Image (tube, rainbow, N blue to C red):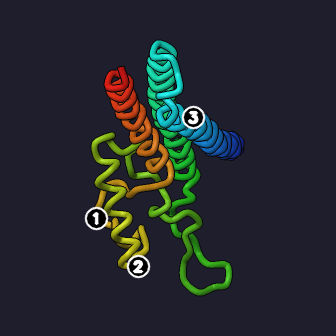
Amino acid sequence: MTNKTELLKLLEATYQRIQHHHDALWEEAKHYSWWIYILLAGLISLHLNLRFLEPWVGILLVVLGNLFGCVLSLIGFNAVRREGEMFYTARQMRDHIMVALKLDQPIPNPSGSGFITIVPQEEFVDQPANLPPLKLAPNACGAFFNALKKKPNNEANKNRKKSFGIRDGFQLTFLITACLFIVLLVVSLITLIQAQ
């Protein structure tokens, strides 16, 4: 009995850990994306007004702003990936505790008809924590086209190892904005060079 009591306490602590990582994921994604969008808007405005600045001021602002934006995007990408791994680990721990408590086994239905399973195996974590970076864009396209076909995401991706989720969407957004900062840096420098 003591073992089950300890497992139930551990299960409660694990649920708190899952909630903590879930909340942290949202906060990190939200704050990094806000900073990136504000910086990107400012740099686009700067690019459009480069002709009104001294060349050295323009170069300094363009280079520092875009490098900062690129670094911020990559930090956001890595922060969301790492927090996703911790979230995944907490969910795996929950699954192991549920198996130890035999919550995945069918039990007699209290109403008397057949058996029920408190936690079906389908709810257990069996996917990797994060998609590989090179698979983010293809999976985003697949999820988009599946949505156009009006197929629910879980039905359309039954044979796939990992479907495209919101965490993957934020990771892809951070990678795209890092590329945008690099492109904006190159375009702004070309504009400044041509202006002289």
Q: Quadrant of residue 175?
A: top left
Residue identifier under label 2: 150
Q: Amino acid at mark 2?
A: Lys
In the rendered structure, find residue 159 and report the number of the disc placed on it: 1
Query: Which circle's residue, 2 or 3, is located before the other in the chain?
Result: 3
Residue identifier under label 3: 42
Front-most of 18 and 67? 67
Give the residue displayed 51% in from the left and 63% down from the top: 105
Relative to 76, 144 lies left or right: left
Give the residue displayed 63% in from the left and 37% down from the top: 31
Against 78, is 128 above or below?
A: below
Front: mark 1 or 3 = 3
Against 195, is 44 above or below?
A: below
- In x, y percent, where is residue 50? 48, 28
- In x, y percent, where is residue 26? 62, 44
| Secondary structure at numbered mark 3 | helix
Q: Amino acid at mark 1?
A: Asn
Give the residue displayed 47% in from the left and 33% down from the top: 47
- In x, y percent, where is residue 91? 54, 46
User: Given contact means CB atoms under 8 Å apart, are the residues at marks 1 and 3 in contact?
Assistant: no
Query: Which circle's residue, 1 or 3, is located before the other in the chain?
Result: 3
Front: mark 2 or 3 = 3
